[in-house]
Amino acid sequence: RSTVPATNQLDLAVAEEELRALLEIAQAGALANDPQFAGVPGELMNLRDVALSGDGEPTTSPVFSKVIEMIARHKPAGVKIVLITDAGGLDRADVKRGLTLMDAHEGEVWAKLDAGTEPYYKAIDRSAIPFARILKNITGCARERAIVIQTLFVKLYGKGPCADEIAAYCDRLNQVRAAGGQLKNIQICTLARKTMALINGRPAFDAVSALSPTEVESIAATVKSRTGLAAECYYGA
């Protein structure tokens, strides 16, 4: 987003009606008639999940647990509720209530972990939330349920993460598991679209670029060898 949002509040009633209508369209197979889905193979036109993500961090919503209740009322059996989160709000009381509801309704948490060290975390995520809190929240959440770790590695001013940073990242994953955290798998991603954020007043796309497929695969191989966890590769555009 390159402009200020027109609203920063969620109208739960409107969201419920939109979700209900979209689920009906998807289940009727009518999405295939939308030009945006032209050329998508039929076997991929399956409703797999209702995901909470995108333009803002879902766990900052003051009605997070009510959103989960609403989704659970409408989603078909076998369709997951997926929370894609920066992990900064996983310790909030209402979020924990929502996660418990997700556990009962085919929920899955994808927690972001984009670094192994505090300096790299600050450079990449540019968040005011301490790195230690992110790690604590991921660990606490993973103790209650098995979660997915989603990680974005990029080139910053032409340089990708160094070997020491990747090793530290693997150490963080091992620490989560040593503390009782359950990790389903690790998603190793890179930049897939033009980012419109600003870095020091300049568009981020001037500073940030995607890793090559070989670089993504190399990181995934390191994760597998140093942690024993399954690692999936998601490539850039």
Image (cartoon, helix red, strand yellow):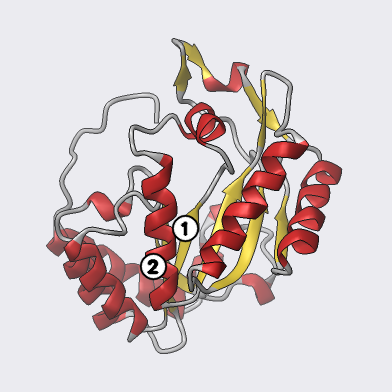
Q: How many marks?
A: 2
In the rendering, at what x and y percent does residue 157 appear?
A: 67, 18
Q: At 47% from the left edge and 30% from the top edge, which residue is drawn? A: 122
Q: Is residue 154 left or right of residue 64?
A: right
In the rendering, at what x and y percent does residue 12 appear?
A: 15, 61
- Which amino acid does the dot numbered 1 rest on? Ala
Is 1 above or below relative to 215? above
Quadrant of the image containing the C terminus: top right
> Mark 1 — residue?
111
Quadrant of the image occupied by residue 215: top right
Quadrant of the image containing the N terminus: top left
Q: Which mark is residue 141?
A: 2
- Which amino acid does the dot numbered 2 rest on? Cys
Cβ atoms under marks 2 and 1 closer than 8 Å:
yes
In the rendering, at what x and y percent does residue 183 appear?
A: 56, 70
Quadrant of the image occupied by residue 214: top right
Q: Marks 2 and 1, how far apart in space?
A: 9 Å
Quadrant of the image occupied by residue 107: bottom left
